[in-house]
Image: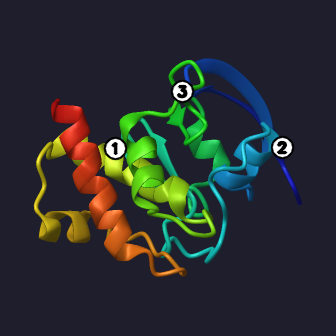
């Protein structure tokens, strides 16, 4: 039996409501809202492609049940400052830190969180923090460079 309920939450700074089933996950709700940056890939919370920020913490959107985001503040890769790229997004472009782009939104969101917590991370800290995000194209050296470049851009 599919029970539907209405939830209300803040999505990228704007209030929204959605009809959700108890079985739906956050990625499905975001797609219903027209946002496709968080992508379900592994369905097990292991790859980071579905990364979304909920109440300030990164979560796996594929594992987060939609009813649980009622009242939450949800931020996705689609949140932007007047449609402009932020320093993290720009650094990923400048270093070629993506190839197919499938995993890039999750890496960008995690990089933002990393730099908020550790403005000048070491390579080992970068690797450790981003360990939950997988890149099937193996752009890892470029991703490390992008994080370093974004950290430098944030500083000055």
Q: Position of residue 70 (x, y in %)?
A: 60, 33
Q: Which residue is located at x 38 percent, y 48 percent?
A: 91
Q: Which mark is residue 91?
A: none
Residue 4 disc label: 2
Q: Position of residue 116 (x, y in %)?
A: 23, 39
Query: Residue 136: horizontal and vertical position, in percent?
Result: 54, 81
N-terminal-most mark, 1 or 3 = 3
Above or below residue 13? Residue 93 is: below
> Label 2 vs label 3: CA separation?
37 Å
Q: Residues within 10 Å of mark 3 (few under 14, many from 20)?
A: few
Colour setup of the view? rainbow
Classify mark 2: residues with Cα within 10 Å, few (<14), some (14-19) or many (20+). Answer: some
Residue contact at pointers 1 and 3, CB within 8 angstroms = no
Residue that mark 1 sits on? 112
Q: CA distance from mark 1 to mark 3?
A: 15 Å
Residue 19 in the figure: left or right of residue 13 = right
Name which residue lies at 56% across and 31% down: 79
Q: Locate the N terminus and report the quarter of the image it occupies.
A: bottom right
Which residue is outermost to the right? 1
Work out whether residue 13 or residue 67 is closer to the camera in this orientation and state it.
13
Regarding mark 2 in the picture, which secondary structure is present there?
Answer: strand
As measured in the structure, the alpha-carbon distance from the residue carrying label 2 to the one carrying label 1 is: 34 Å
Q: Kindly state the secondary structure of the residue where label 1 is placed.
A: helix
The one of 106 and 3 positioned closer to us in this rendering: 106
- What residue is at 79 percent from the left and 39 percent from the top? 34
- Relative placement, left or right, of 101 versus 60 is right
Drawn side of residue 92 relative to residue 111, left or right: right
Q: Which residue is mark 3?
A: 84
Q: Position of residue 43 (x, y in %)?
A: 63, 74
């Amino acid at each position: 039996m599919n029970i539907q309920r209405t939830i209300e939450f803040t999505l990228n700074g704007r209030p929204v409501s959605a009809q959700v089933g108890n079985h739906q996950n956050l990625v499905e709700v975001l797609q219903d809202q027209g946002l496709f940056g968080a992508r379900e890939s592994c369905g097990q919370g292991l790859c980071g492609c579905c990364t979304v920020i909920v109440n300030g913490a990164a979560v796996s959107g594929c594992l987060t049940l939609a009813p649980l985001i009622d009242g939450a503040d949800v931020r996705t890769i689609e949140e932007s400052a007047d449609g402009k790229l932020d320093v993290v997004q720009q650094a990923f472009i400048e270093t070629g830190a993506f190839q197919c782009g499938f995993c890039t939104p999750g890496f960008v969101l995690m990089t933002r969180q990393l730099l908020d917590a550790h403005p000048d991370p070491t390579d080992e800290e970068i690797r450790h923090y981003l360990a939950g995000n997988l890149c099937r194209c193996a752009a890892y050296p470029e991703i490390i460079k992008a994080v370093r470049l974004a950290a430098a851009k944030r500083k000055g």
